Amino acid sequence: MAEFSWDIRSPLDRALVAGPHGARGDAGVSLTEIRNFDLVQVMARRGKAADVAKAAKARFGVAAPETPKAVGAADAMLIWSGPDQFMVLSKGGKHGIEALGQAFASSASLSDQSHARVLISIAGTKARTMLAKLSSIDLHPDVFAVGSAAATSMDHTSVTLWRGNDRPDGQAVFNLLAFATFAESLWHTVLDSAAEYGVTISHSEEL
Amino acid sequence: MRITCPFCGERELGEFTYLGDAKPVRPAADAGEDAVYDYVYLRDNIAGVMSENWYHGGGCRAWLKVTRNTLTHEISAVEPAAGAGAAKVGA
């Protein structure tokens, strides 16, 4: 019998080259791939939405989003992904599939997406201008404030987009979750869109 | 054309997939062959206001019932189709 050795690898393992990209000078866009996160999709079973809300509140101390929002808990991010469903983004296994399986055993169906998605954090003075090329939704701060989220499409690829807390220098941060198998394709599209503004590329283990 | 998803808000057409007429209702098991034939195959080709099923696959993945004028593309109503999440809207 063949022996397999499974390595955990980022979906952008080959495509991501850390460093500067595109136009020279001050980079207008910074792209950071976040690696090694736990991501669990929580979907309320029919008629159990109230039970899920209660279980989520007990587990995370905050109410799970019921509208397109991303809600920060002490050690997790709850991101709306559709009616009566949300995703739990965390690190270190505390809110991994096994742990959450207990919490939502009687109310929700769970699906581990930890290695099924790529997470890209987008910031910089030109981040919103660049995203306007890819997304048809309005990301102006008056409409898409910190904590706003959207299940939408970019480059014909389904993505979950949400605005995280601003950077210390006041710059907006947009987080993008996409299917791992579309990661390289979307990555190249993002790079092409951002190239004219100058890009800084990196990866991180920090959420 | 844009569709205002009751869960996501106004979105471009590209995020949606058209299924078809939302009017046909599955006949009872003992309704007979003609009723099943009508349900499966026969469709009205409506020039005017029509009730349609749309899927927001590029977004929240909810099924929607859209009332659309096929002549003008004017959309007069969008509501969630029966299923998960539907109970909450408008309730």
Image (cartoon, coloured by chain):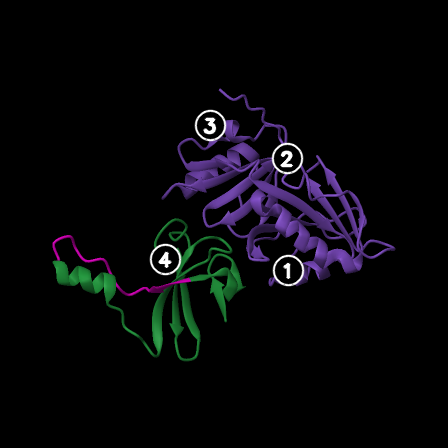
Chain colours: A purple, B green
Give the amino acid type for the residue marked by disc 4 in the picture: Ala
| Circle 3: element type | helix
CA separation, marks 4 and 3?
A: 31 Å
Front residue of A96/A31: it is: A31
In the rendered structure, which disc, 3 or 1, sits on the residue that comes first in sequence? 3
Looking at the rendered image, the disc whose residue lies closer to the viewer, 3 or 1, is 1
Is the residue under label 2 in contact with that under label 3 (CB below 8 Å)? no
Q: Report the residue at 61% width, 46% height from top.
A: A183
Q: In which quarter of the image is the C terminus of chain A?
A: top right
Residue A108 in the image, given as x and y percentages of width and height: 43, 37
Give the amino acid type for the residue marked by disc 3 in the picture: Gln
- Residue A102, disc: 3
Work out whether B91 lies above or below A168.
below
Few, some or many residues within 10 Å of mark 3 (<14, 14–19, 20+): few
- Residue A134, disc: 1
| Circle 2: element type | loop
Looking at the rendered image, the disc whose residue lies closer to the viewer, 1 or 4, is 1
Give the amino acid type for the residue marked by disc 2 in the picture: Ala
User: What range is drawn magenta here?
Assistant: B18-31
